[in-house]
Image (cartoon, rainbow, N blue to C red):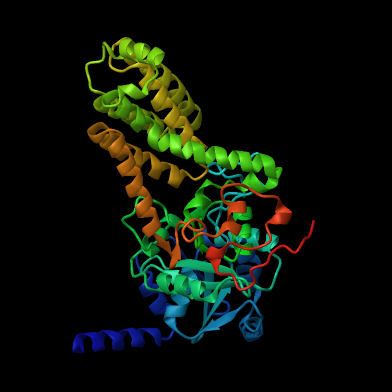
Amino acid sequence: MKQQDSGGAQHRLEEHIAPTLAHIQTEFAGCADLVHRTYPRNATDVLYFGHLTASTDLNRDVLIPLANASADEMDSLLQRSQFMEVHHAKECVKAILDGHAAIFYGQKAYVVNVYGPPSRSVESSESESVITGPHDAFIESIDTNLSLVRRRVKSPHLKSIKLSVGEITKSDIFVLYIQGIADQDLVDEMVQRIQDIEVDSVFEGNMLVQYIDENPNSVFPQFLTTERADVVASKLMEGKMAVFVDSSPSVICAPTGFFEFFSSPDDHYQRWALGSGLRILRFIAFMITVAFTAFYVSITTFHYEMIPQSLLLNLAESRSRVPFPPLIESLLMETMIELLREAGARLPSKIGQTIGIVGGIVIGQAAVQAGLTSNILIIAVASSAIASFVIPSYIMSASIRLLRFGLIIMAGIWGNLGLLLGLGLIIIHLAGLTNLGTSYLTPVAPMVFTDWKDTFIRGPLWALRKRPAQTRAKNAVKNKMRR
């Protein structure tokens, strides 16, 4: 206890150390990229990191005025609004790390915000491409990301809470919500979870998600992450909140339900009938990618009576030269598909596409001719792989692909009983998941029929009058149109 008390006293003592030039230089000892400029004419020193500052702002607001100022003009110069006096060394150190320039004159220290590191321009998202609708996506600059949302939600009710995570990295985190719509209890719960994180570093939004998950051992993603500004704006209007992490293009939206991962941003930019058809197609693709290969293993191992007689003859002929049972055969082909998928993702885009197409054709054809697999299994595995690409969320698609291996093994051991048992376990697991205390399977469990108009289908915009029940929005009505 005495050791803890002394440590706390030492921490409080450090907070009240004066921000002198010697102390700040000691703090940054060994930092070769720290720039130190001295102006003997007015006895002034400047410290800053050149790669964190905008050279134009630095020259205009700091370097040129100090170079031209005499000793008699310093007091009036430092009265300008851009010069902010700091009284503690800890504040000065943090300001320099945040891209400020620290100015030391006499016994006083000032900081000037000249933050402007180089960053890539706003471009379209490669992982969330759309056919219609906006194409601008978030980048690694949190200021740019916040501006993209403010441009769409021009309301003073859009509030932001600034937090910091990481004992070493001190990553800035902003929690955005619309006051009067979002449930304050959910906002407070999210803020508390972020404040409870005690780690050295958080670099990315998807890293932060793993610290605030209620069920970290689940294979299913429990928070929706997106790189699209229009998606974040629409989620905020629904009564949800958005969490921005500095240096990350991924923004967390919460609370999130399972069915949100099957919604594409351009569903609302097309005619409602087309949007509904595409959304239904995604749920069909979900069932295909989860169970198609497992169903093939089940019927070819235990349930030949389910196969039509004309197809049974072709299947028997195709499998007559295969030396492996259907379970081993399907696991080998699924593993090969995953290897091709991963290789295509890691290689440069043009080479990756070539590897995926040529590799799939060559290996599939060669495997059939060598008698390592049957033609019908190639169709089943290829159909499952294609269906997984239909799901808009990459994280959800990857989770489903992992589940497919478990269902294949259960179908190979117990047949259709194992397949149904596996699907039942998945449904039970999904029903037990929660997100910020809300049900992960909303609007199915609990049943909210009014939300089905924008879950399994995309109803007409004029008919979507209420916000999702999962958000517990104070103002539930978002559309007052009458047709």
Residue at screen point 37% across, 28% down: 337
Q: Residue furthest right?
A: 483
Q: Nearer the viewer, residue 218 or 280?
A: 280
Q: Is residue 425 left or right of residue 227?
A: left
Q: Is residue 293 left or right of residue 276?
A: left
Residue 76 horizontal/vertical position (percent): 66, 85
Say if 215 sits above or below 194 in the image: above
Does the image show residue 420? yes
- Quarter of the image that includes the C terminus: bottom right
Q: Nearer the viewer, residue 480 or 8?
A: 480
Q: Nearer the viewer, residue 456 or 475?
A: 456
How many labels sit on residues? 0
Say if 215 sits above or below 263 in the image: below
Does the image show residue 250? no
Residue 213 horizontal/vertical position (percent): 38, 62
Say if 297 sits above or below 443 in the image: above
Residue at screen point 35% across, 87% down: 12
- Quarter of the image that includes the N terminus: bottom left
Q: Is residue 203 left or right of residue 266?
A: left
The quadrant holding residue 197 is: bottom left
Residue at screen point 70% across, 55% down: 463
Q: Is residue 452 left or right of residue 153?
A: left
Residue 108 horizontal/vertical position (percent): 51, 85
Q: Nearer the viewer, residue 466 or 153?
A: 466
The quadrant holding residue 90 is: bottom left
Say if 305 sits above or below 174 in the image: above
Residue at screen point 49% across, 72% down: 186
